Image (cartoon, rainbow, N blue to C red):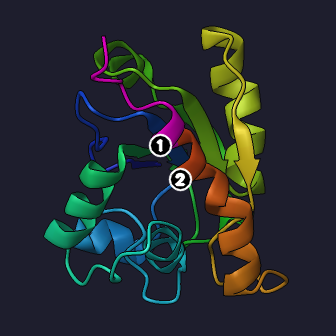
Amino acid sequence: MISHPIPPFFDENSRVLILGSFPSVKSREQGFFYGHPQNRFWRVLSAIFDVPIPKGIEEKKHLLRSSGIALWDVIASCSIQGSSDSSIRDVAANDISMILNSCNIAQIFVNGKTAERLYRKHIEPIIHVSAVYLPSTSPANASYSLERLCAEWGVVRFVTEESKPSLKK
């Protein structure tokens, strides 16, 4: 069994929560999400928000903060071989209530089929909030080009912009 080593990333301005399945070996080594250089997560976010691709963890955190994105994973602990989602067994889910209680999340998204399946099984029955599926940014999802991922993931920008608090009275 491996416990999730990365704390959730969010602040009071987060409007969207993106949940992956479980951090890859590279992400666990780096101590932050989507650390494998072949994962397209950061390229997709930078494209849909029209900003440079973040180079280090601090730049990644800045992109998330400035875009209103909270980030975590569905799984708190599991048995896993390497980074393979297909090998995941013995799942215990994360309690996402701390995020939902700390910020005004307008939408929850799941990154990939494994995150979607495990969210629906372990989290949705508890919080009664459905998540929107987005195709995986993993390099294992070779059927999706970067352009196609960006087209699907564009909804994230739409939701963050539509859900920003208005300063108008």
**Mark 2 residue element:** helix
Q: Nearer the viewer, residue 4 or 149?
A: 149
Residue 75 in view: no
Q: Is residue 40 above or below residue 89?
A: below
Q: Is residue 8 above or below residue 51?
A: above
Check if residue 132 falls in the magenta segment: no
**Residue 50 picture location, percent across and down:** 43, 74
Region of the chain picked out in magenta, as a range: 160-169
Q: Main secondary structure of the magenta part?
A: loop
Left/right placement of residue 65 relative to residue 104 reads left
Q: Which residue is mark 1?
A: 161
The amino acid sitting under disc 1 is Glu
Q: Nearer the viewer, residue 99 or 75?
A: 99
Q: Residue at x 71, y 58 (%)?
A: 112
> Do the residues under discs 1 and 2 have CB atoms within 8 angstroms?
yes
Near mark 2 (Cα within 10 A), the count class, few <14, some 14-19 or many ≥20, is some
The amino acid sitting under disc 2 is Arg
Q: Residue at x 67, y 25 (%)?
A: 122
Quadrant housing residue 104:
top left
Left/right placement of residue 158 relative to residue 128 reads left
Q: Residue at x 28, y 44 (%)?
A: 9
**Mark 1 residue element:** helix
Find residue 25 and name its label. Answer: none
Quadrant housing residue 117:
top right
**Residue 139 picture location, percent across and down:** 65, 84
Left/right placement of residue 141 relative to residue 167 reads right
**Residue 152 picture location, percent across and down:** 74, 63
Of the 4 image quadrants, the one containing the C terminus is top left
Q: Residue at x 31, y 41 (%)?
A: 8
Find residue 157 and name its label. Answer: 2
